[in-house]
Amino acid sequence: MLNLVIFGPPGSGKGTQSAKIAEKYRITHLSTGDLLRQEVEHDTPLGKEIRKYIDKGLLVPDEIVLREIKQQINGQEGIPGFIFDGFPRTINQAEAFDRMLDQNDTPLCLVISVEVEEEELFNRLMGRSEDSGRSDDSDEIIKRRLKVYKEQTFPLISYYKAQGKIATIKGMDPVEQVFGKICHAIDTYLCSRKVLPVVY
Ligand code: ADP
C-alpha cells in the first residue's frame, strides 16, 4: 500500500498537489480540511462545533479529527493507498495515526514536506481569498493559521525526521515543477525504498 502524507503550512499548495498525486498514483486523497468543511456544510451539531474552530483559524480538537480519519480508512482494506492532506497536524494526532497504521499493518511510506517562504504564503492566501469562499481566508485569520502552524504543526518535522520518512520539497516554483519534484521523491521511494531527504 502506498501511504503518503503531504505536509506544509497553509498556502503551500498541499491541496493542489495532493489531487495530482492521487490521480497519477491512483490512491485516495483524504483532506481533513475538506472532510471538516463538509461536516460544517451539513450544519449538524458536530458541524456547528467544528465551525467555531475553523472560523477562528484554530485547530479542530484531535478527537474529532481522529474520528473522521478512522471512519475514512476503516473498511478500505485492499485499496492501493492514501494521500493524507492536512493530517496529522499535531504530535498527538501523529502518535495516534502511527498506532492506527500499526493496527492495520499498513505503514506510512513517505512524508512529503513542502516548504514555502512565509511572505509568499501570506500573499498566496490573501490572493485566493476572493474566490475561495472560505470563511477562514481573511487577513487576521490567515495570520492566526500561520501562527498555529508554527506552534503546533511544525514540530512534526522533527517527529518524522526521527523516523527517516521526510522528503523536503522546495515549493516556491510553479505547480508543475513542484509536482515533478514530488514525483521524483515518490518514484525513488517506489523503486528503491529510499527517502530522498531534500529535492531542490
Ligand atoms: P490550510 O492548510 O490552508 O489551513 P485546510 O483545508 O487543510 O487548509 O484546513 C482548514 C482548517 O481545518 C484548519 O485551519 C483547521 O481549523 C481545520 N483542520 C484541518 N485539518 C486539521 C487537523 N488535522 N487537525 C485539526 N484541525 C484541522
Image (spheres, grey):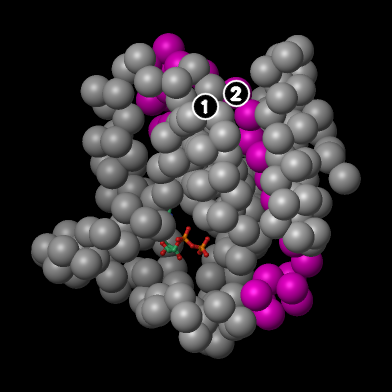
Which secondary structure, mark 2?
A: loop
Q: Quadrant of ligand 1?
A: bottom left
Is residue 109 highlighted in magenta? yes
Say whether marks 1 and 2 touch (CB < 8 Å).
Answer: yes
Query: Which disc, if any, is residue 55?
Result: none
Q: Looking at the image, which residue is at 69% across and 29% down?
A: 186
Q: How far is the residue under mark 1 from the one under mark 2?
A: 5 Å
Q: Looking at the image, which residue is at 81% across and 33% down?
A: 197
Above or below, 77 relative to 181? above
Give 150 or 3, whichever is nearer the viewer: 3
Relative image position of residue 63 (x, y in whole percent): 30, 46
Q: Quadrant of residue 133?
A: bottom left
Q: Which span of residues is magenta-colored?
A: 96-124
Q: Which residue is mark 1?
A: 3
Amino acid beneath label 1: Asn
Q: Which residue is mark 2?
A: 109
Relative image position of residue 182 (x, y in whole percent): 71, 40
